[in-house]
Image (tube, rainbow, N blue to C red):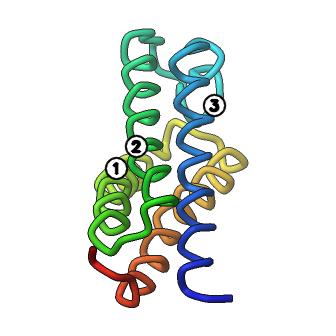
Amino acid sequence: MSARTWLRGGLAFLAAAQFVVGCWALLLPRSFFDIPWVGMRMPYNAHLMMDYGAMSLATSVALGVSVFIVRRSMVRTALAVYLVFAVPHLVIHLRLLHHLTPGERVPLLMALSVATVIPLVLWPLTTSLKEA
Protein backbone atom coordinates (compact mmCIF):
# COMPACT_ATOMS: atom_id res chain seq x y z
CA MET A 1 0.00 0.00 0.00
CA SER A 2 1.13 3.54 -0.70
CA ALA A 3 1.97 6.12 1.96
CA ARG A 4 -1.09 8.08 0.87
CA THR A 5 -3.35 5.07 1.49
CA TRP A 6 -1.88 4.50 4.95
CA LEU A 7 -2.26 8.18 5.74
CA ARG A 8 -5.86 8.29 4.65
CA GLY A 9 -6.69 5.15 6.60
CA GLY A 10 -4.99 6.40 9.75
CA LEU A 11 -6.57 9.84 9.47
CA ALA A 12 -9.99 8.31 8.86
CA PHE A 13 -9.61 6.09 11.92
CA LEU A 14 -8.60 9.02 14.14
CA ALA A 15 -11.40 11.21 12.72
CA ALA A 16 -14.00 8.50 13.29
CA ALA A 17 -12.80 7.82 16.84
CA GLN A 18 -12.89 11.53 17.69
CA PHE A 19 -16.32 11.87 16.12
CA VAL A 20 -17.81 8.94 18.06
CA VAL A 21 -16.25 10.04 21.36
CA GLY A 22 -17.27 13.63 20.70
CA CYS A 23 -20.89 12.79 19.96
CA TRP A 24 -21.10 10.49 22.96
CA ALA A 25 -19.63 13.04 25.40
CA LEU A 26 -21.67 15.92 23.97
CA LEU A 27 -25.02 14.18 23.65
CA LEU A 28 -24.85 11.68 26.53
CA PRO A 29 -22.37 13.26 28.94
CA ARG A 30 -23.42 11.25 32.00
CA SER A 31 -23.11 7.95 30.14
CA PHE A 32 -19.65 8.92 28.89
CA PHE A 33 -18.57 10.09 32.35
CA ASP A 34 -19.67 6.79 33.90
CA ILE A 35 -16.85 4.94 32.11
CA PRO A 36 -14.40 4.24 34.98
CA TRP A 37 -11.37 5.79 33.29
CA VAL A 38 -13.30 8.93 32.35
CA GLY A 39 -14.95 9.75 35.67
CA MET A 40 -12.12 8.24 37.68
CA ARG A 41 -14.29 8.35 40.82
CA MET A 42 -14.37 12.15 40.73
CA PRO A 43 -17.43 14.43 40.93
CA TYR A 44 -19.53 14.60 37.75
CA ASN A 45 -19.42 17.82 35.75
CA ALA A 46 -21.82 17.90 32.77
CA HIS A 47 -20.37 21.16 31.47
CA LEU A 48 -16.85 19.77 31.21
CA MET A 49 -18.08 16.55 29.58
CA MET A 50 -20.02 18.48 26.93
CA ASP A 51 -17.07 20.84 26.34
CA TYR A 52 -14.83 17.79 25.88
CA GLY A 53 -17.34 16.35 23.41
CA ALA A 54 -17.43 19.58 21.42
CA MET A 55 -13.62 19.74 21.35
CA SER A 56 -13.45 16.14 20.15
CA LEU A 57 -15.93 16.93 17.36
CA ALA A 58 -13.83 19.94 16.31
CA THR A 59 -10.75 17.73 16.17
CA SER A 60 -12.65 15.21 14.06
CA VAL A 61 -13.37 17.93 11.51
CA ALA A 62 -9.67 18.76 11.03
CA LEU A 63 -8.81 15.07 10.75
CA GLY A 64 -11.76 14.33 8.49
CA VAL A 65 -10.96 17.16 6.07
CA SER A 66 -7.38 15.90 5.83
CA VAL A 67 -8.67 12.51 4.61
CA PHE A 68 -10.00 14.26 1.51
CA ILE A 69 -7.54 17.13 1.15
CA VAL A 70 -4.38 15.08 1.32
CA ARG A 71 -1.85 17.89 1.17
CA ARG A 72 1.22 18.04 3.39
CA SER A 73 0.19 21.23 5.22
CA MET A 74 -3.38 20.05 5.80
CA VAL A 75 -2.42 16.60 7.04
CA ARG A 76 0.36 17.92 9.26
CA THR A 77 -1.95 20.53 10.73
CA ALA A 78 -4.59 17.90 11.50
CA LEU A 79 -2.01 15.57 13.04
CA ALA A 80 -0.53 18.41 15.08
CA VAL A 81 -3.98 19.44 16.35
CA TYR A 82 -4.61 15.87 17.41
CA LEU A 83 -1.18 15.45 19.03
CA VAL A 84 -1.56 18.68 21.00
CA PHE A 85 -4.54 16.96 22.61
CA ALA A 86 -3.37 13.32 22.70
CA VAL A 87 0.04 13.78 24.33
CA PRO A 88 -1.14 15.88 27.30
CA HIS A 89 -4.19 13.62 27.61
CA LEU A 90 -1.89 10.61 28.03
CA VAL A 91 0.34 12.46 30.52
CA ILE A 92 -2.67 13.61 32.56
CA HIS A 93 -3.98 10.06 32.83
CA LEU A 94 -0.52 8.74 33.75
CA ARG A 95 -0.56 11.15 36.68
CA LEU A 96 -4.06 10.08 37.78
CA LEU A 97 -3.69 6.31 37.71
CA HIS A 98 -4.25 6.11 41.47
CA HIS A 99 -7.97 6.68 40.79
CA LEU A 100 -8.18 3.41 38.85
CA THR A 101 -7.98 -0.27 39.65
CA PRO A 102 -5.16 -2.23 38.01
CA GLY A 103 -7.72 -3.80 35.66
CA GLU A 104 -8.89 -0.37 34.54
CA ARG A 105 -5.38 1.01 34.07
CA VAL A 106 -4.23 -1.42 31.39
CA PRO A 107 -6.93 -0.80 28.74
CA LEU A 108 -6.79 2.95 29.38
CA LEU A 109 -3.02 3.17 28.96
CA MET A 110 -3.10 0.93 25.91
CA ALA A 111 -5.79 3.03 24.22
CA LEU A 112 -4.16 6.37 25.04
CA SER A 113 -0.70 5.14 24.02
CA VAL A 114 -1.98 3.85 20.68
CA ALA A 115 -3.84 7.13 20.18
CA THR A 116 -0.53 8.96 20.60
CA VAL A 117 1.57 6.56 18.50
CA ILE A 118 -0.73 6.51 15.44
CA PRO A 119 -0.22 10.18 14.50
CA LEU A 120 3.51 9.90 15.25
CA VAL A 121 3.74 6.96 12.83
CA LEU A 122 1.69 8.82 10.21
CA TRP A 123 3.76 12.03 10.38
CA PRO A 124 6.81 10.73 8.42
CA LEU A 125 4.46 9.54 5.66
CA THR A 126 3.55 13.17 4.99
CA THR A 127 6.96 13.95 3.45
CA SER A 128 5.87 12.37 0.16
CA LEU A 129 2.74 14.54 -0.11
CA LYS A 130 2.40 17.52 -2.42
CA GLU A 131 2.09 20.90 -0.83
CA ALA A 132 -0.45 22.53 -3.10
Given contact means CB atoms under 8 Å apart, are the residues at marks 2 and 1 in contact?
yes
Q: Position of residue 104 (x, y in %)?
A: 67, 44
Assign the N terminus to one quadrant of the image. bottom right
Q: Is residue 40 visible?
A: no
Toward the right, the furthest residue is 103
Assign the C terminus to one quadrant of the image. bottom left
Q: Residues within 10 Å of mark 1 (few under 14, many from 20)?
A: some
Find numbered disc 1 in the image and state the secondary structure of the residue it sits on: helix
Q: Nearer the viewer, residue 86 or 102?
A: 86
Which residue is drawn at the image coordinates 42% and 61% (left, top)?
69
Q: Residues within 10 Å of mark 2 (few under 14, many from 20)?
A: many
Q: Which residue is mark 2?
A: 59
Q: Kindly report which numbered mark, 3 or 1, lies closer to the viewer in this rendering.
A: 1
Q: Nearer the viewer, residue 15 or 40?
A: 15
Which residue is drawn at the image coordinates 44% and 68% (left, top)?
70
- Seen in the picture, residue 27 relative to 98 is either above or below; the reply is above
Q: Kindly report which numbered mark, 2 or 3, lies closer to the viewer in this rendering.
A: 2
Tag shown at residue 85: 1
Q: Amino acid at mark 3?
A: Pro
Find numbered disc 3 in the image and state the secondary structure of the residue it sits on: helix
Task: Classify residue 29 by image quadrant.
Answer: top right
- Seen in the picture, residue 11 relative to 128 is either above or below; the reply is above
Q: Position of residue 64 (x, y in %)?
A: 49, 50
Q: Position of residue 9 (x, y in %)?
A: 63, 67
Which residue is drawn at the image coordinates 44% and 17% (left, top)?
50
Q: Amino acid at mark 2?
A: Thr
Q: Reading the chain from its start, which is encountered first: label 3 or label 1?
A: 3
Q: Is residue 9 visible?
A: yes
Q: Which residue is mark 3?
A: 36
Q: Residues within 10 Å of mark 3 (few under 14, many from 20)?
A: some
